[in-house]
Image (tube, rainbow, N blue to C red):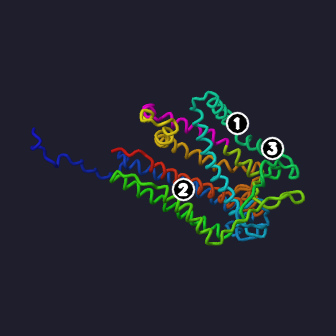
Amino acid sequence: MSDAAIDPRSLRAPPKRPIRLSWSDERVRAIVWQALVVGIIGFIVWWLWSNTAHNLEVRRIATGFGFLGREAGLPIAEHVIDYSPTDTYFRALLVGFLNTLKVAVIGILLATILGTLIGIARLSRNWLLAKLAAVYVEVIRDLPLLLQLLFWYAILQGLPGPRQAIHPAAGVYLSNRGLKLPWIEWQDAHSYALLTFLVGTLFTWLYRRAAVAQQMQDGQPRKVWPVALGLMLALPIAVWWAAGAPWAVDWPELRGFNFRGGLTVSPEYFALLLGLVLYTAGFIAEIVRAGILAVPQGQWEAAQALGLHAGQVLRQIVLPQALRVIVPPMTSQYLNITKNSSLAVAIGYQDIVSIANTTLNQTGQAIEGIAIIMLVYLSISLSISLFMNWYNARIALVER
């Protein structure tokens, strides 16, 4: 039969059969089983909720989040925002959330840098450097994280007191009270300059995208660094200068039995950050090494044939391609470093878990306290996942 003789209507999908109220119909069975599963889950949730509400009522335990407006009376040694024990529980929990966020963000940045360097070192042609990186990865990954945190905290607690503090540079002191560093006395001019820098960074990124788009059309490269230099350096300095150019450094000084002034990095925060970064960097190093090895050897050979040296090949050819392999498992490590920060309670760092535990012990609001902890970690984890999924989709190879 020729193609012209084929009836186009015969190529259409056959019409769907109507649903028959019979157990022999697979669609009816699927609906019944799904409804049964949903009903069982709903019953379990209702039973747990009603049982919990009954037990709380019998023990005369109040429920709800009204306690957040009461005075906390909770001392917090380290806080990003202003806080005093006369503040509310809500502000105390906010301080704990910011303390957790401070560990997670800085830890992710440092662990990424250190893990990338170690992963590259494992592939080095220098035998000693490659073996040292391999030993680091094997040792650091085989030791429990909690044990490492306790080890670093014990090391920091074993440092000399403030009067005998280690003084490696001007204004830098390391003692059992923590690390003291010089710090700029922050004023409004610095805030204006910082805001200008962030806005300049945004416009530099937009200009770079436009420049790349125009280069794809006419083939003419356009320099981005003069615009970046003006928007991200010259303009913030001009704003800072117009605001009075304040520049006062707060130097730490030994007064009595402790230091006053400067920036303080507490032993608890230092030990927690150090342990998380060193531990997570071991896993990131293996992810980076696997991503680099996933790039075909022909890419190296072709780049070297063009006259590029090893550093240029790694930065411009290999790593951009390796990111497609590196980013998905890297997301898991970022989530791990965030969730592992909850071990801070073991060394006395007051994060959201520590402050929420103290809050529920004082108020008896155990369910609400646990719910707040879960909400905080869920929010941070989902934010990291959304950003990494967006970045992974952005760098994904689009096939024609």
Q: Assign the N terminus to one quadrant of the image.
A: top left
Range drawn in magenta: 278-301
Point out residue 88 in the picture as x, y percentages from the top left corner: 73, 69
Circle 3 sits on which residue? Answer: 154
Identify whether 331 is placed above or below 285. Answer: below
Cα distance, mark 3 to mark 2? 49 Å
The residue type indicated by label 3 comes to: Ala
Identify whether 16 is placed above or below 363. Answer: above
First in sequence: mark 1 vs mark 3: 1
Point out residue 257 in the picture as x, y percentages from the top left corner: 89, 57
The residue type indicated by label 2 comes to: Gly
Specify whether residue 361 is in view.
Answer: no
Cα distance, mark 1 to mark 3? 16 Å
Specify whether residue 47 is in view.
Answer: yes
Identify whether 345 is placed above or below 94. Answer: above
Point out residue 182 in the picture as x, y percentages from the top left corner: 75, 58
Helix, strand or loop for the magenta stretch, by majority? helix
Q: Residues within 10 Å of mark 3 (few under 14, many from 20)?
A: some
Circle 2 sits on which residue? Answer: 42
Q: Quadrant of residue 187?
A: bottom right
Q: Which element type, helix, strand or loop, lies under badge 3?
A: helix
The residue type indicated by label 1 comes to: Leu
Q: Which element type, helix, strand or loop, lies under badge 2?
A: helix
Circle 1 sits on which residue? Answer: 143
**Would you say 312 lies left or right of 343 here?**
left
* 293 drawn magenta: yes
- Which is more toward the observer, 23 or 343? 343
- Which is more toward the observer, 10 or 313? 313
Q: Assign the C terminus to one quadrant of the image.
A: top left
State the mark number for residue 195.
none
